Image (cartoon, rainbow, N blue to C red):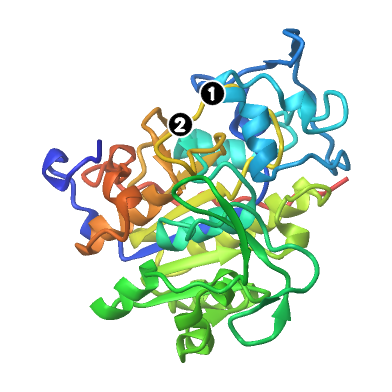
Amino acid sequence: MALSLGACSGRQPAVVEHTVIILQENHTFDNYFGTFPGAGGATSGLTSTGLRVPLTPLPEMDYSGLCNSWDCALQAMDGGKMDRFDLIGVGLSAYTQASSEEIPHYWEYAQHFVLADRYFTSVHGPSLPNHLFTVAAESGGVIDNISVGSGGVACDGSPTGTVTVIDANGNRIEQSPCFDFMTLPDLLEAAGISWKYYNDGDGIFAVIRHIRNSPMWTRNRASTAQFLQDAQSGQLPAVSWLIPSYERSEHPPNSICAGENQTAEFINAIMQGPAWNSTTIFVTYDDFGGFYDHVPPPQLDQEGLGPRVPLIIISPFAKPGYISHTLYEHSSMLKFIETRYHLKSLTARDAAANNMLDSFDFGQPPQSPLILQPRQCP
């Protein structure tokens, strides 16, 4: 059940003037925080043969090539038994876990701010549908990434691959990756609230027709380098999506260390800029990447939820050292923003999502910045 503003006596989310969503890629909660004290993690996992195996050390650059498609996610989840992750990789390659020494910055943020251990992906599948949920609380029925090849037309009219869409009866069709449904930026625009999408490629709005073919495409998109400048100079909009480059996204086989260093650079820029005292940062992951997680996702509808991923909430107003056990999903970040600005819901998902206010105490002495230095990568 969603937590209403009325249920949060004494809390004033209006002090949050800037919300930043940092979206990394392809790790589960157990894969990163399974050993975090007090959190609902696991250090072993079940296989399809009924064997319980230990989660072994996660390589800094993982070349195992795990499958994270819609079908692979459903296969691994096995109706909530969470025991067939060995069938979507090679051997036990999905059953790995980072140590605190491997992701020290993330652990330090989690220890100082908020770590959520019941944050699930919105869709049983990979990046594209989950990225759509982070801006629209829906995927338009999309269940997988754009296929390689031709047969479809992009929103700018160029030829491209197709994407699999599922209807209410579970039927699949292939169609062009161009859609038109309401997004959170549409609500923000209508309310006169500033927003920007920072990434170093086309990004998710390339598949939203009315944004791709409007002035928003150039006006509201910028590079990650521009984000650093905006954060340091006090030019952050009210709402930011920040999508690191593929090489710094922690998507296997890319370096975990390099990705964590860049996340810390982004957060340092916010903390050292003038907006820190009025900012909330969500650091999370788009999908499970094929890695093992032991918690069965609640099935809210045909599309999800999918396996858990990490979520760290960093803010002067975040409860210090708090572990949230509240059910969250990608739509919850939208619900937080909608609650803050008194916006309507986009879909049934964000309408029902928890607004995350249990992770904040707006009456506490504001938390100080936590500046972390880049570490030497292997």
Q: Which residue is mark 1?
A: 295
Tag 2 or tag 1, which sits nearer the N-term? 2
Q: Which residue is mark 2?
A: 118
Mark number displayed over residue 120: none
- Decide: is 34 above or below 114: above
Rendering quarter of residue 4: top left
- Left or right for 93, reference 46: right
- Left or right for 208, reference 225: left
Q: Secondary structure at mark 1?
A: loop
Residue 157, how many percent across, how many down?
64, 87
Discs 1, 2 touching: Cβ within 8 Å: yes
Q: Amino acid at mark 1?
A: Val
Q: Quadrant of the C terminus?
A: top right
- Decide: is 231 above or below 363: below
Residue 333, how many percent across, how many down?
39, 52
Label 1 and label 2: CA atoms lie apart by 8 Å
As rendered, which of 182 and 320 lies closer to the eye?
182
- Left or right for 142, reference 210: right
Mark 2 packing: few (<14 Cα in 10 Å), some, or many (20+)? many
Residue 86, how many percent across, how many down?
78, 24
Name the residue at 26% across, 58% down.
345
Of all residues shown, which one is farthest toward the bottom?
215
Name the residue at 56% across, 39% down.
310
As rendered, which of 294 and 371 lies closer to the eye?
294
Name the residue at 72% across, 8% down.
50
Q: Can I make out residue 15 in this image? A: no
Residue 260, how many percent across, how many down?
68, 50
